[in-house]
Amino acid sequence: MTETEYLIVGAGPTGLGAAARLHEKNLDWCLLEAKEHFGGLAASYVDEQGFTWDQGGHVQFSHYDTFDRYMDMALGRDGWLNHERESWVRICKNWVPYPFQNNLHRLPPAERWECVQGLLQAWRQSSQIENRKSKIENFQDWIQQTFGEGIARLFMSPYNFKVWAIPPEKMDWHWIGERVSVPELDSVLRSICTGEDQVSWGPNATFRFPRRGGTGAAWQAIGEKLPCDRVRLGCTVTGIDIKAKQVVTDTGERIAYRHVISTIPLNHLIGMTPGVVEAEKANDLRYSATHVVGVGMEGQTPDHLRTRCWMYFPESNSPYYRVTVFSNYSPENVPRPGEQWSLMAEVSESVYKPVDQDRIVEQTVNALMEDGLIPDRAAISSKAHYMLEQAYPTPFLGRDAVVDPMLRAFEAYDIYSRGRFGAWKYEVANQDHSFAQGYECVERLVSGGGSAYEHTLFHPEIVNKRRNA
Ligand SMILES: Cc1cc2nc3c(=O)[nH]c(=O)nc-3n(C[C@H](O)[C@H](O)[C@H](O)COP(=O)(O)OP(=O)(O)OC[C@H]3O[C@@H](n4cnc5c(N)ncnc54)[C@H](O)[C@@H]3O)c2cc1C
């Protein structure tokens, strides 16, 4: 193939969303992917001992009927296991159901009062100050003004630093939308007075997971349903010649295009496409890495973990921010179902939060023992470690003023940068959003219309409240 109308770079969820729509429309397209498999960050792998791992805790929930249709088609309805979220926060040696701020009655009395006092103060201030939100300058301000000092100190500030690996003071807050539970004061007080847990908040209160092969199985199935003469795996794009409108691959091949849909990280795209955005500007795009440490265990899942999905760890006595009981998502995530089980821990890293990469697996196992999640070190049969260099696109201060002109600069050359790191918008960077970004970008290009076709990228606040794409 030496020329094509639509050239897609990357076969993660975004690239596959674009390819799916182009295939539906029977157009001329081609997809190039550096790896030998589909799925990108949502791919899964099997370690040497036969345990299946995702690249971080992935659960499937969706804002789109189209996405659901493709997922049903990928594995068939029987290929999925449906789950109700059961997640917990480890704090002050207690387990508090998630969302933490809705379940303060589980805290020791002194910490419970600290949280309530802070909430009352925040509530009083918010009713005094007009246009409260205009006074918020960063994520840390948002946390404190929304939840008060107590919840900020105990959970929100340390937890968010642990996940993002960047101080909340250096982050924007406009991305939050549906991603953080903001309970009404009366519902917080009700839970404290009645002692009732409130656990059903949020878009991922129920989710589904592939019966076999991890999250990546769904993306592999979608990729394999595409016509193989249009897809090239193991093909790395090394440059884009904007004058000739040609993509250059690692074998030196040149493919002429009319439009490129690029789903690779925007900072890489800038580096490989001289003349569009100044190379140094790529450094303005902040991100963090994640280490995924999988621990495969012999025996039965301990009773207290049998129904748990994942647990959050805000405190500094463990390296991880989240641990998933991965074998609870599917018994087939272990090689001998019923005789083994597995835990998957995630640890973030950045210049603000360095990680001793040689010792992180041992540090993780030690902390899992201290947190009572691994009952017996001798029962460990597998330890897997995978580092995602770019895992979280940080919603840094001034992000949109940096990213949006970059996206427009590329569009002027018919290059559409989309997806988790392609468009750098965390609020629309899950699998369903990413698939939709690719799908909607094709709608826009085919229709010859403008950005109004790209609801996901340009109207996250609407998309995240609805289910009708
Ligand atoms: C730790 C973690 C937890 C997550 N949890 C969830 C969750 O619970 N639920 C959820 O829905 N989503 C979750 N996600 C998000 C999900 O993984 C992403 O939405 C999705 O993978 C992004 O898709 P993408 O196609 O935009 O990018 P990617 O998945 O990054 O795909 C980009 C593709 O481009 C390829 N590529 C890169 N450079 C080149 C090149 N030069 N030439 C050719 N190909 C190239 C890459 O190999 C890759 O396949 C999580 C992500 C992470 C990191």
Image (tube, rainbow, N blue to C red):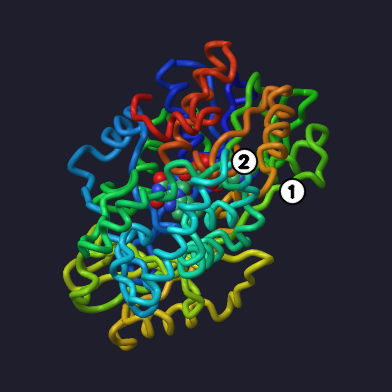
Tell me the distance, in whole angstroms, between the alpha carbons under discs 2 and 1. Answer: 25 Å
Three-letter amino acid code at the position of disc 2: Ser
Looking at the picture, how far across and down is residue 146, in whole percent?
Answer: 49, 52
For the point 70% across and 35% down, the residue is 248
**Residue 134, which numbered label?**
2
Whether 398 is drawn above or below 20: the answer is below
Which quarter shows the N terminus?
A: top right
**Residue 284, which numbered label?**
1
Three-letter amino acid code at the position of disc 1: Asp
For the point 60% across and 73% down, the residue is 355
Tell which tag, 2 or 1, sits nearer the viewer: 2
For the point 67% across and 67% down, the residue is 352
Looking at the picture, how far across and down is residue 174, in whole percent?
Answer: 56, 42
* Residue placed most toward the observer, 374 or 255: 374
Query: Label 2 neighbourhood size at 10 Å, few (<14), some (14-19), many (20+)?
Result: few
Q: Quadrant of residue 67?
A: top left
Residue 291 visible to the viewer: no
* Residue placed most toward the observer, 320 or 141: 141
Q: Earlier in the sequence, mark 2 or mark 1?
A: 2
For the point 33% across and 54% down, the residue is 214
